[in-house]
Amino acid sequence: MAPVDLPPTFGEAVRGEIMRGKALAPFTWFRVGGPADALFIPADKNDLAQFLQQLPDNIPITVLGIGSNVIVRDGGVEGVVIRLVGKPFGQIHIDEENAQVIAGAGAPDAMVARAAVKAGLAGLEFFAGIPGTIGGALTMNAGCYGRETKDVLVRAWGYDRYGDEPRVFDNADMGFTYRKSAVGPGIIWMQAVFQCERSTPEAVAATMAEITVKREASQPIREKTGGSTFKNPSGENGETLSAWKLVDAAGMRGARRGGAQVSEKHANFLINTGDATAADIEGLGEDVRAAVKAHSGVELHWEIKRIGREA
Ligand SMILES: Cc1cc2nc3c(=O)[nH]c(=O)nc-3n(C[C@H](O)[C@H](O)[C@H](O)COP(=O)(O)OP(=O)(O)OC[C@H]3O[C@@H](n4cnc5c(N)ncnc54)[C@H](O)[C@@H]3O)c2cc1C
C-alpha cells in the first residue's frame, strides 16, 4: 500500500505535534521498521478528541505504546500513528478509599506497579515484569507469573476513531482471553482503573522484587526484542504447551536470518543482533513456525503484533 495522501491542511488545528514521514524504529524495542505516513503526539485528551473528530474516514489509525510487542515492517505504517506519551497520558492516581489505582494509557506498567507498592496496595506487582504501557496491557491482556490484566482491571475508557464520547468498558465488556482483548483496535485506550488489596509497602515490594529477579534470569531484557514471539498453544487434550519448548525441540534456539536471531537465553524471543530488518525478524519467525510445524505438528500463532507494509 502506497503512503496515504494526507491533505496539505492535515492536522493544522491541533496543539500536539504532527510529523510526516517520521521513522518509527526508535519507538520500538526491536528498533526496526519504516516511517509512519504521519506520527501524531497529542497535547492532551481534548487535543486527541478534536483531531479524531476532524480526521477523514479514509485515513487509517494505528496506536503505538512503547513498542515492546510490535514489529513495524520496513515499508512503514499507513495513515496516522498515534503515540500517547508524556504527562497528560501517564498520570497515576491512588484512590485510597477504594484501594484502586487509576492510570493513564501512556503510563509505563512498571511505574503503575511502583505507585501501588508505595501506597501499600497489592495485586499489581506483575506489571513490574512487563515493559509496556497500560494501553498495551489493555490490548494484549498482558500478564506474567500467574496474573494478567483481566485479574485486576475494573474498567477502562477510550475514544473510538471519531473521538466523540468517551467509551467506557467494564472488565466483563473487554472480552479478555489469553493475550487478547475482544475490543480490538477500534478503541484508543485513555485510562484504566485497577482493583488492589490493602497490604504494606514492604510486603508488596518483596513480591515485586521476586518478579524482577525471575525475569532478569530468564528473559533477554537488555536486547532489542519484542517479548514472547508466539502464544503458548493448546495441546491435543486442551493442555497448555510451552512455545519455547516446542521451538527448542525443533532445534531453532540460536537460529539466524540476516541480523535476526532466536535468543539463546529464551527460545520464544527473537532479537535484533544489530542490523536486522523487520523482514529478517518476521522471516525468522516464519522459519521457526515452519520448523515447529514440521517437528511436532503444532501450529504456533504470533503474539507479537506485526504492523505496516513490507518494503
Ligand atoms: C523483554 C520483554 C519482556 C516481555 N514480557 C512480557 C510478559 O511477561 N508478559 C506480557 O504479557 N508481555 C510481555 N512483553 C510484551 C509487551 O511488553 C506487552 O505486550 C505490553 O503490554 C505491550 O505494551 P506497549 O505499550 O509496548 O504496546 P505496543 O507494543 O506499542 O503495542 C501493542 C499493541 O497494543 C496496542 N496499543 C498500545 N497502546 C494502545 C492504546 N492506548 N490504545 C489502543 N491500543 C493500544 C497497539 O496498537 C498494539 O496493537 C514483553 C516484551 C519485552 C520486550
Image: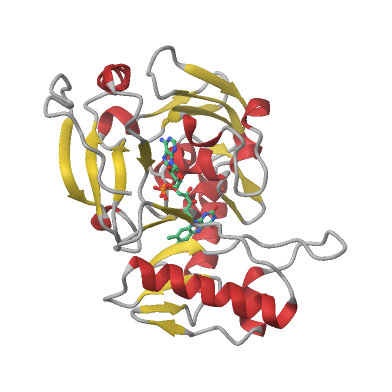
How many marks the image carries: the answer is 0
Residue 119 placement, left or right of 107 = right
Q: Is residue 107 visible?
A: no
Image quadrant where residue 299 sits: bottom right
As displayed, is residue 31 above or below residue 94?
below
Is 69 placed above or below 195 here? below
Viewer-side residue, 21 vs 158: 21
Q: How has the structure been colored for display? A: secondary structure
Q: Residue at x 31, y 44 (%)?
A: 78
Nearer the observer, 144 or 278: 278
- Residue drawn where x is 48% and y is 30% of the image: 186
Left or right: 297 with respect to 302?
Answer: right
Q: Position of residue 265 (x, y in %)?
A: 50, 79
Q: Could you tell me which quadrant the C terminus lies in?
A: bottom left
- Residue 16 image point, x, y percent: 18, 28
Residue furthest out toward the bottom: 251
Residue 109 position in % (x across, y down)? 44, 44
With 121 as the anchor, is 177 left or right in this view? right
Question: Can you give x and y, in whole percent of width and height, for residue 107 in the image?
Answer: 37, 38
| Residue closest to the far right | 237
- Name the image quarter holding residue 83: top left
**Can residue 39 be seen here?**
yes
